[in-house]
Amino acid sequence: MENIVKNQKKFIDKVKKLNENIKKYYNILTMGCQLNENDSEKLAGMLEEMGYESTEDLNLASVYILNTCCVRENAEEKLFGKLGELKKLKYQNNGIIAVCGCMMQEKHIQDKLKNSYPYVDIIFGTHTLQNFPEDLYNSIIGKKKVKDILDIDGEIYEGLPIKRNSNKTASVTIMYGCNNFCSYCIVPYVRGRERSRKPEDILKEINNLAKEGYKEVTLLGQNVNSYKGREDYGFAELLRDVQKIEGIEIIKFVSPHPKDFTDDVIAAIKDCNKVSRLLHLPLQSGSTEVLKKMNRKYTKEQYLKLVDKIKAQIPDVLFSTDIIVGFPEETEQDFEDTLDVVRKVNFEQIFMFIYSRRVGTVADKMKNQIPEDIKHERFDRLKNLFEEQVVLNNEKYIGTTQKILVEGVSKNNSKMLTGRTDSNKVVVFEGSQNLIGNVINLKIISEHKWYLKGEKKFP
Ligand code: 5AD
Ligand code: SF4
């Protein structure tokens, strides 16, 4: 493995040489989840070492990367729209277009790119990210198309460069792939089986982040609580070890699976005061019947029991969730069950999705697909219920003291700063800019639906 990384460093140097004395720029568009964002940070790291600089100005760039997602259909529309836009720029700037990420692992997308978008220079998948310097070099030198896609699971490569998007909060991938095969989801087909990074590699990375001044880390994986670093070392052990790292003040993780939320994980969260009290617990549906068809491996009652168990152990816990509406065969009663769970749990945040058919998944082959108008009507009802709950939920913050990671100046009012509570609520408050990047205490004085207003306690 080390040899492969070393070999790529040679290509980094070769491209760097080509760029000597010329200022060159890259632009990366990332679609999808935080795992893709983290992959883009790695691509940015490689590009910076090759002598490129990041730019938002597409006219200036000569390397364009589109890092794709295929979890829902709208990402496909976005990719093909963007490629149309880049065509002219590519010829104008003698640039290189690289398309990568989850969508590239799908055969029908590979074919579509080949047949309809011949001006794409490099295509690489989720298992070959580490080869990017070599692929780029070959494309520049050989002026030929490069296709670098592996259908077997990729290895884990340590020691690749990385350029992070933020200098306050960092994402750390702890595991790759997914074994769950939820019937609606394409991820297991494009990201392969679960592979966990070694605990020592993860802890080394987080230790370095702490030394660089990062205060917050988010542990990433498709199914973080099935992390297995060693036979006797799982997600609970990892949380306890990250808790010990001096300098790190907030630990988050996405996404756990309710079926793997074991007692040792709950105990670790309870014992580790740095672990955020906002837990993301994807529900997907509140109907036992639908959950069975989704292959989620829990019932409505088991989900609610788990929530109660966690609340009993960790009284200040709050929940966020993912919900899909309009799964095939979802009846009105099934949907009512989802609303029932939403009323009972009082989620702090809900990521709502309209079911999107994905080629190759089990649910795509189900006969009784739900008509678009019903899907949208259910989506709106869920959204309305959630909005009613937000205001009620917000009231509990008023008068309380909250730990806030200060993120920056408010976009709407340059005199105000913004930050987020541990539960991910946006808080706006007056304060001096040297607070940015720090974790401070604020008293919450009012609620405004999508944000709270705070006041500094100790001026
Ligand atoms: N349609 C709609 N939403 C989906 N998700 C995954 N696959 C689909 C699909 N085919 C949602 C799930 C998952 C989140 C990341 O995306 O809610 O938790
Ligand atoms: Fe998809 Fe289910 Fe795996 Fe999440 S756990 S990535 S929803 S298959």
Image (cartoon, rainbow, N blue to C red):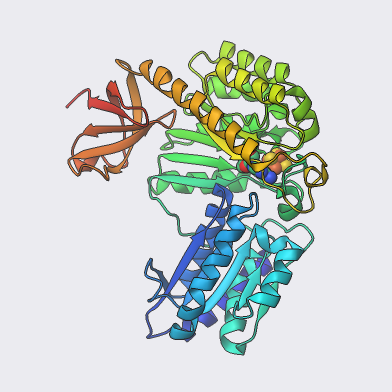
Q: Residue at x 70, y 61 (%)?
A: 127
Residue 36 visible in rendering: yes
Q: Residue at x 75, y 25 (%)?
A: 298
> In what quadrant does ligand 1 lie?
top right
Q: Position of residue 183 (x, y in %)?
A: 77, 41
* Residue 426 shown left or right of residue 204 in the figure: left
Q: Is residue 119 above or below residue 326?
A: below
Q: Position of residue 384 (x, y in %)?
A: 49, 27
* Residue 453 shown left or right of residue 247 in the figure: left
Q: Position of residue 173 (x, y in %)?
A: 59, 47
Residue 68 visible in rendering: no
Quadrant of res 291 = top right
Quadrant of res 52 = bottom left
Nearest the viewer among 70 and 81 is 81
Quarter of the image for the N terminus: give it.
bottom right
Q: Is residue 31 above or below residue 120?
A: above
Nearest the viewer among 98 and 290 is 290
Quarter of the image for the C terminus: give it.
top left
Marker count (numbered): 0
* Residue 448 shown left or right of residue 258 in the figure: left
Nearest the viewer among 166 and 339 is 339
Q: Position of residue 337 (x, y in %)?
A: 67, 20
